[in-house]
């Protein structure tokens, strides 16, 4: 709700449905998902989500990042694997969620995220699109708002994370590091502390809504959701 560039963005109207409910609906459609919750400290978000029949977990307002909020929320859940899906990922592909769940079938894997080819119509110098560098074994080396590697090729990071419970709790216990604060990217906390992030490759990224221009791009890219579905259901 406190987004500086687009206040109240997760409740933005997207074809008659709040943005957060578009995201919930896509997560619910994915294979391997047992339950969907919205973790929030906002009365307004909680009211909208609850009215749509989605389970809400209330959290404190004093958290550093969305992943820290999820770490707080799971205290009330009996879950070994948790996905953190950012509520501004309005056209998130179900494939992304399913690929992350599949990768976590390997018990040695602690954290998984997703990357996609960089969108041809966007500039790598755009700091709102996070770039990822991945090694030949599919492990993330670094994430940045800058155009790395120099000269490309560039990969777009998709803001969905799959965690084993122990890894998520450890993430929250570490606290923010220098790299995370420099880039304002929470996943760098894991890299800075030496925890491997596995990156699955998918065909295309998603439109994260950070600005009014992003919202307009989202509105033009997805079908009229309200014609077929007024929301999602827990």
Image (cartoon, rainbow, N blue to C red):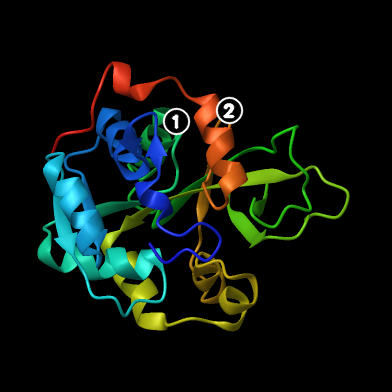
The answer to whether one can see residue 86 in this image is no
- The mark tally for this picture is 2
Q: Crowding near pointer 2: few (<14 within 10 Å), some, many (20+)?
A: few
Along the line of sight, which residue is nearer the eye, 39 or 141? Answer: 39
Q: Distance between the residues labelled 2 and 1?
A: 10 Å
Along the line of sight, which residue is nearer the eye, 135 or 35? Answer: 35
Q: Residue 203 carries which label?
A: 2
Assign the N terminus to one quadrant of the image.
bottom left
Query: Considering only order in the chain, which callout, 1 or 2, is on the residue closer to the N terminus?
Result: 1
Q: Residue 117 carries which label?
A: none
Q: In this view, does 10 lie to the left or right of 126?
A: left
Residue at 23 percent of width and 52 percent of height: 38
Residue at 43 percent of width and 82 percent of height: 175
Residue 27 placement (x, y as % from top left): 31, 36
Give the residue at mark 1: 93
Residue 161 placement (x, y as % from top left): 41, 52
Q: Is mark 1 on a helix, strand or loop?
A: loop
Check the image and report above or below for 118 versus 112: above
Q: Crowding near pointer 1: few (<14 within 10 Å), some, many (20+)?
A: some
Residue 188 placement (x, y as % from top left): 56, 68
Residue 150 placement (x, y as % from top left): 86, 55
Q: Do the residues labelled 2 and 1 touch (CB within 8 Å)?
A: yes
């Amino acid at each position: 709700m406190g987004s500086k560039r687009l206040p109240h963005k997760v409740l933005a109207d997207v074809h008659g449905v709040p943005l957060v409910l578009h995201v919930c609906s896509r997560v619910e459609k994915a294979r391997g998902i047992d339950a969907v919750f919205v973790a929030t400290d906002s009365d307004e978000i909680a009211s909208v989500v609850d009215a749509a029949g989605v389970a809400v977990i209330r959290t404190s307002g004093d958290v550093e990042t969305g992943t820290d909020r999820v770490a707080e929320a799971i205290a009330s859940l009996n879950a070994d694997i948790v996905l953190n899906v950012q509520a501004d990922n309005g056209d998130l592909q179900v494939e992304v969620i399913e690929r992350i769940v599949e990768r976590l079938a390997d018990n040695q894997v602690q954290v998984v995220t997703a990357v996609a080819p960089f969108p041809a119509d966007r500039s790598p110098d755009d700091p709102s699109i996070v770039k990822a560098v991945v090694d030949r074994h599919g492990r993330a080396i670094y994430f940045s708002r800058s155009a790395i590697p120099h000269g490309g090729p560039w990969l777009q990071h998709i803001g969905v994370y799959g965690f084993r419970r122990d890894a998520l709790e450890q993430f929250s216990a570490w606290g923010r590091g220098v790299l995370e604060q420099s880039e304002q990217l929470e996943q760098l906390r894991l890299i800075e502390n030496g925890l491997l992030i596995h990156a699955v490759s998918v065909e295309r990224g998603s439109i994260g809504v950070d600005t009014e221009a992003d919202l307009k791009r989202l509105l033009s890219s997805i079908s009229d959701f309200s014609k077929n579905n007024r929301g999602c259901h827990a």
